[in-house]
């Protein structure tokens, strides 16, 4: 099937966004590559939740909402725009750093349980099991949180971000029954899983074709447990292409149909 959406795009509003990451530049590229839907998801920590780091503190709702005036300029564009955010796991409170009142203001919400470089104590990276246990607990805390009904998709699942080693080491160490238990609950909650295309860019072939690619195997289990999916580039400058090319290939390998996508991205 053809994937024509990107629901994980950061702009200059995010502290890690590059100067070129403007709505104007993204919309130009979206037109060129044929995106019909684009979701802007800048980093956000709700100011009503205590514990924001020095990096997160300035990135509250009022900050990320600045983009709405730019989005309004493209309301008649062929590419439909969605105002969202990438929220955060609140480790001290074992939940999500967002109130229900704030969550209601977004078109969609991504929540990562794998921002280990931000939310996890650094000494948890080793032994590997400590990092795995952290991500599993964070995942459970997120889908059981009081804002779970507002969450659209779990961002880059089980991909320990910026770990000091190749994060693909961790994924095969997680038991299949753990994956299936979490995915079953995710589907029950109506939360999708994000398929992040850059994670496939370096090694999609030939492992995936043989059915041995770790991520393909994990997403296949999620599909079997009833999960829906969204695709995202996690772009921070210009759209991380070949997003469409990779997304289409992954969709084919997973034998995804329209009904396998989250309703908002169909």
Image (cartoon, rainbow, N blue to C red):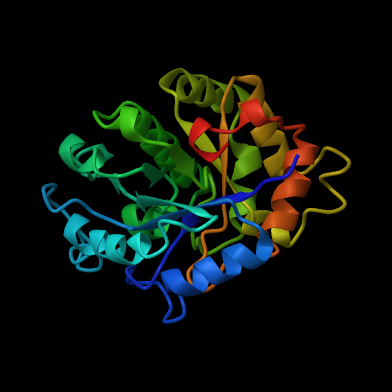
Q: Is residue 240 visible from the viewing direction of this image?
A: no
Q: Is residue 110 above or below residue 29?
A: above
Residue closer to the observer: 46 or 158: 46
Quadrant in the picture for residue 10: bottom left
Q: Is residue 121 left or right of residue 177?
A: left
Residue closer to the observer: 227 or 128: 227
Q: Is residue 72 left or right of residue 260?
A: left
Q: Residue at x 58, y 63 (%)?
A: 30
Q: Is residue 177 left or right of residue 71?
A: right
Residue found farthest to the front: 76
Residue found farthest to the bottom: 19
Q: Is residue 209 visible from the viewing direction of this image?
A: yes
Q: Is residue 59 above or below residue 217?
A: below
Q: Residue at x 67, y 63 (%)?
A: 33
Q: Residue at x 77, y 44 (%)?
A: 213
Q: Is residue 165 above or below residue 255?
A: below
Estimate the x, y position of residue 4 in percent, counting from the top left. Answer: 64, 49
Q: Is residue 61 above or below residue 29?
A: above
Q: Residue at x 62, y 38 (%)?
A: 173
Residue closer to the observer: 19 or 37: 37
């Amino acid at each position: 099937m053809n994937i024509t959406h990107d629901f994980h795009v950061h702009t200059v509003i995010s502290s890690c966004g590059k100067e070129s990451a403007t709505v104007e530049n993204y919309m130009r590229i979206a037109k060129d590559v044929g995106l019909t839907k684009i979701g802007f998801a800048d980093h956000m920590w709700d100011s009503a939740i205590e514990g924001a780091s020095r990096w997160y503190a300035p990135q509250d709702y009022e900050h990320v909402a600045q983009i709405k005036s730019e989005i309004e300029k493209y309301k008649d564009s062929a590419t439909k725009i969605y105002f969202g955010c990438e929220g955060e796991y609140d480790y001290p409170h074992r939940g999500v750093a967002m109130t229900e009142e704030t969550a209601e203001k977004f078109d969609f919400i991504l929540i990562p349980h794998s921002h280990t470089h931000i939310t996890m104590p650094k000494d948890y990276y080793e032994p590997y099991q400590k990092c795995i246990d952290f991500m599993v607990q964070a995942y459970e805390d997120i889908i059981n949180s009081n804002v779970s009904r507002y969450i659209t998709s779990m961002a880059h699942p089980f991909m320990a971000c910026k770990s000091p080693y190749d994060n693909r080491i961790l994924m095969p160490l997680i038991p299949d029954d753990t994956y299936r238990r979490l995915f079953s609950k995710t589907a029950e909650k109506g939360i999708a899983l994000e398929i992040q295309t850059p994670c496939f860019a370096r090694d999609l072939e030939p492992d995936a074709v043989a059915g041995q690619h770790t991520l393909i195997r994990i997403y296949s289990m999620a599909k079997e447990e009833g999960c829906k999916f969204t695709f995202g580039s996690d772009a921070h400058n210009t759209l991380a292409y070949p997003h469409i090319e990779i997304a289409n290939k992954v969709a084919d390998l997973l034998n995804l149909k329209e009904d396998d996508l989250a309703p908002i991205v169909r």
